[in-house]
Image (tube, grey):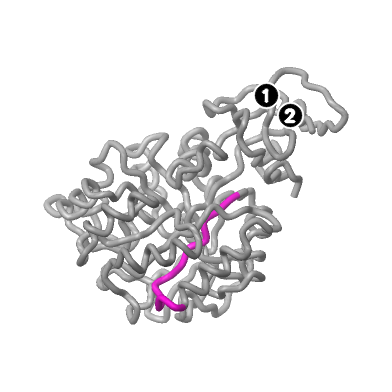
Amino acid sequence: MILKNAIIIDENFEETKKDIEIENGVITKISDSLSGDDEIDFSGKKILPGFVDIHIHGANDGDLSDAKRESLDRMSSYLASKGVTSFCPASMTLPFEQLCEQFKAVEEYKGSESGAYIHGINMEGPYIAMSKKGAQCGDYVRSADIEEFRKLNTISKICLVDVAPETENALEFAKEASKTCTVSIAHTAATYEEATAGLCSGFSHATHLYNAMPPIKNREPGAVTAIFDSDTATAELICDGFHNHPAILRTAFKILGEDRAVVVSDSMRAAGGEDGEFVLGGQTVYVRDGKARLSDGTIAASTSNLHEEFLNLLSFGIPFKKALKACTANPARVIGVYDKTGSISIGKSADLLVLNEDLSINTVFIKGNKQ
């Protein structure tokens, strides 16, 4: 298959007019004036790498916590319609037995996705700070347990594990867990010093920066400043305009630059649906005007998606290249799959997003298959 006459975003994230050849789901050639038996003319269109969402609990009335193939499939198909070509379903703070069931469901479903495909699981909780649990269920918050983590990882691959670095066993846990996956600072009341100690002990990422963390104060800089102060730590940002003010997002992108910001949806099952009452991690969530909250007003995940957030960032003044890398290459690097996806490069999976002139979605390809 040859995709012709489009402006593509090349592996350096620069615009160029090239054709793309796809064989067996992989990009095999990128060149001028390619030809073949199966050609698709995308004149006037722009081809981007497919989006990679490494933090999503649910969408389209499906949720990982359901531990059902049908729910994962609802998520997969919805994500594909929004330009997300691969993802990491995220668990919640729940009993070990329930996590086992969810991990089993992922493992049984992987390889048969109807749309976006799964890289592995984002294990958000239960190793968090009670004071910053947010919409996680406090009944199941517990200390980091490397044996529990290893057992779950044998059921299905963990790409990310989210931990509060100031909690019991956290640093020792991170040193071991970081040999298996990315360890992320999350749901934390850590001081600057505690967060920095984490970054020296296996932590390398931050989950939904600003949210479920202390605010920056001039004499109490906290975990957010520790991330900013690092040269290498990456950070997730929910860019729905509700979780973080546009000015805060502009500041974060200025500090993090092109390679350290990661856009995530952190969406729950209400994404793609109407307002109403829903369940997230065993707790009732009330969605009004697309904003999800617990009964006490605590923000509970989002109802957004990466295409919507990408457009938000552009409207907030974030440069196109920065916004796009944060939705594609950067999340792929965080979970160690940039050799397979995250850019338009020869040898990588043909995970592609074709946009119209107004940046609305025209066509999505996942592993070379038109969705």
The numbered mark, 1 or 2, whose residue comes first in the sequence reads 2
Is 197 above or below relative to 214? above
Mark 1: few/some/many CA within 10 Å (<14, 14-19, 20+):
many
The residue lying at 36 percent from left, 69 percent from top is: 148
CB-based contact (under 8 Å), mark 1 and mark 2:
yes
Foreground residue among 280 and 362: 280
Q: Quadrant of the N terminus?
A: top right
Q: Is residue 173 visible?
A: yes
Query: Would residue 183 appear left or right of 305 to someone viewing this image?
Result: left
Foreground residue among 73 and 50: 73
Mark 1: secondary structure? strand
**Span colored in magenta:** 86-97
Residue at the top extreme?
32
Marks 1 and 2, how far apart in space?
A: 6 Å
**Residue type (three-letter) at the residue carrying disc 2:** Glu
- Residue at mark 1: 30
Q: Residue 260: image x %, image y %? A: 38, 40
Foreground residue among 188 and 109: 109
The residue lying at 27 percent from left, 46 percent from top is: 227
Query: Would residue 178 appear left or right of 197 to someone viewing this image?
Result: right
Total labels drawn: 2
Where on the picture, by quarter, is residue 290? bottom right
Q: Residue 308: image x %, image y %? A: 57, 51
On whether residue 44 falls in the magenta region, the answer is: no
- Residue at mark 2: 21
The residue lying at 63 percent from left, 63 percent from top is: 109
